[in-house]
Image (cartoon, rainbow, N blue to C red):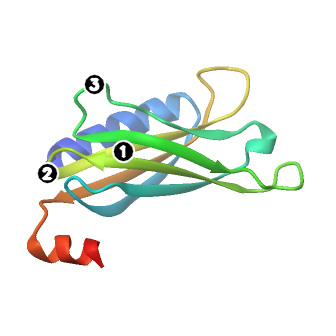
Amino acid sequence: MNTKVLTILLFATSMVATCMHARVSMVQNKKATLGDIFEITLEATPGTGYTWYYLMPGSGAPVEFVSMSSDSTAKRMGAPAKQTWKFMPRQEGTWLITFANKGPGVKESVEKLMYFEVEVAAKTEKTESAAKK
């Protein structure tokens, strides 16, 4: 994804978030290899009803959602927990993954948005031999 398109997408999403009174987090960079599953872990407070949701781009996405697991071993209300999302890159390039932190109740209520710019590179002999170790 070129920088101009990414800037426009971030601006448009930020404007929507502002209208929804959501806090916008900066873009975090992540590197991945084509065909290898990678993870994104976010801290959540599921005991309060707030949790992270992956905003799926639809079918045919260049980075495919695989699974989500939650570390819900918190012993007290509102204690932090971790949500781990797994993705499989299907196409080389730079792609934006967006998460929304939503609370209970109103569907449109978004507390925070988190962006990950994922740079997907082709597999090389070096990355394949490192994966085997």
How far across and how far down the image is residue 5, in percent? 18, 42
Task: Give the residue drawn at x 30%, y 47%.
Answer: 88
Q: Secondary structure at mark 1?
A: strand
Q: Nearer the viewer, mark 1 or mark 2?
A: 2
Whichever of callouts 3 and 1 sits on the residue coming sooner in the sequence is 3
For residue 98, above or below residue 84 = above
Q: Quadrant of residue 101?
A: top right
Q: Left or right: where does residue 59 sit relative to residue 83? A: left
Mark 2: amino acid: Glu
Disc 3 marks which amino acid?
Ser
Classify residue 49 as left or right of residue 128.
right
Q: Where residue 110 appears, x then y in whole percent?
A: 59, 33
Nearer to us: label 3 or label 1: 3
Residue 77: image x %, image y %? 88, 48
Question: How busy is the neighbourhood of tag 3: few (under 14 within 10 Å), some, or many (20 plus)?
Answer: few
Q: Which residue is mark 1?
A: 97
Look at mark 3 in the image and give the residue it sits on.
59
Q: Quadrant of residue 123?
A: bottom left
Q: Measure the C-alpha gap from mark 3 to mark 1.
A: 14 Å
On the image, numbered disc 2 is attached to which residue?
92
Which residue is at 34% across, 54% downward?
37
Dot 3 or dot 2: first in sequence order is 3
Q: Secondary structure at mark 2?
A: loop
Residue at 42% x, 39% y is 14
> Quick one: label 1 or label 2, which is nearer the N terminus?
2
For the residue pair 117 and 46, the one nearer the viewer reads as 46
Find residue 82 and report its horizontal and vertical position in percent: 64, 55
Work out whether 39 lies above or below 132. above
The residue most toward the right is 76
Image quadrant of residue 58? top left
